[in-house]
Amino acid sequence: MKIDIFQHILPIKYKEALYEALPPDFYLKDVIESLPTLFDLDHRFRIMDKFDGLMQVLTVTQPPLEMFTTPQKAIDLAKLANDEMAELVLKYPDRFPCAVAHLPMNDMDAALREVDRAINDLKFRGVQIFTPTNDKPLDSPEFMPLYEKMSKYNLPIWIHPERAVDYPDYRSENRSRFMIFSNFGWPYETTVAMTRLVFSGILEKYPNLKFITHHCGGMVPFLEKRIIGSFDHAEMLRGARYKQNLTKAPIDYFKMFYLDTAIYGSTPGLMCGYEFCGADHLVFGTDFPYDSQFGERYTRQTIESIENMAISDADKKLVFEDNARRILRLPI
């Protein structure tokens, strides 16, 4: 079995309501319409059928609700998306073992209520948030109740990076060019979020809290030694006190994150992630269906890249399914 823990879906009723709420010229509409696999289940199933044992944990695709809606509208849309995903899991349990809650993060009280409803009533196995959220870092005090709640539930938080094309690459410009905002900006946003969560002491306070990061942990695995050396040097040379609230080495907290395999077929890249966090913190994720073949290309390439890793079959099984079963506490 292969449990895709980080794919994307846009349930059809939610899609219709989303379009009514989005600005007419919102850039993602063209992207969505070019990918029928996001919302057409027949299209999705035809691609899934090409891969033996493939199952998908349902996570709603971007945009984050807080980006464009009022708090009340975000609440209504989140409930609609979550109810629709719950119906899909109930109707197609052999396709979708579980779903992940979509949250109205511009109203934290409402978000916390939706967490409880999604997990207790709809039987969801975690929540997804975007980074940044409301243009704020994930260690902002207002988000602490969410981390406390998810720690108590012992279920993971998916972190999806978000940066739009109007985020310039240089201060002298007003727009990103050559897809820099997504190709490199998104892994950067993931890396920043991980760093803020580490040094703010959130993982120190909630040691069983589980975060699933997109694109194999951004830049962190590749820059492991730089991370170690830079904070050691900062403390030694400048007297910086970044580590004063931590009881372990900073890099040990970075290794608490779970890294997905959605780097589109790079076995050397996956080996870098594997060497960094070990097989038990690497999870199968494809970024389905964001490719030129509506999900087939990245799914195939990701599976092949894992199969080509110089690791044991037992470790590959951890990546493909066992880690997902464990951290999501799946009954299957």
Image (cartoon, helix red, strand yellow):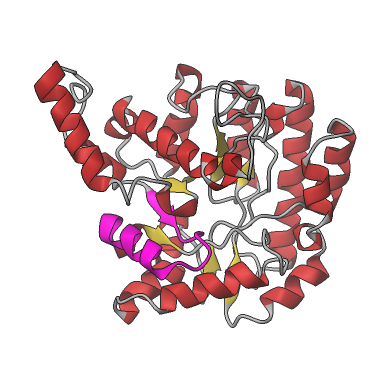
Can residue 159 be seen at all in this image of the molecule? Answer: no
Does the magenta segment cover residue 164?
no
Q: For the magenta stretch, what is the residue range? A: 258-278
Residue extending furthest toward the front:
172
Residue 243 is drawn in which quadrant?
A: top left
Q: How many marks?
A: 0
Q: Is residue 268 left or right of residue 301?
A: left
Residue 314 is drawn in which quadrant?
A: bottom left
From the top left corner, tell me how far across and down residue 68 is, in percent: 75, 27
Q: Residue at x 60, y 35 (%)?
A: 163
Is 103 drawn above or below residue 83 in the view shown? above
Q: Is residue 83 left or right of residue 93?
A: right
From the top left corner, tell me how far across and down residue 317 is, in percent: 39, 75
Does the magenta segment cover residue 261?
yes
Is 76 drawn above or below residue 289 in the view shown? above
Residue 50 is drawn in which quadrant?
A: bottom right
From the top left corner, tell me how far across and down residue 326 is, in percent: 40, 61
Can residue 28 be seen at all in this image of the molecule? Answer: yes
Q: Identify which residue, 239 or 18, lies in the foreground.
A: 239
Residue extending furthest toward the left:
236
From the top left corner, tell me how far across and down residue 136 is, in percent: 53, 22
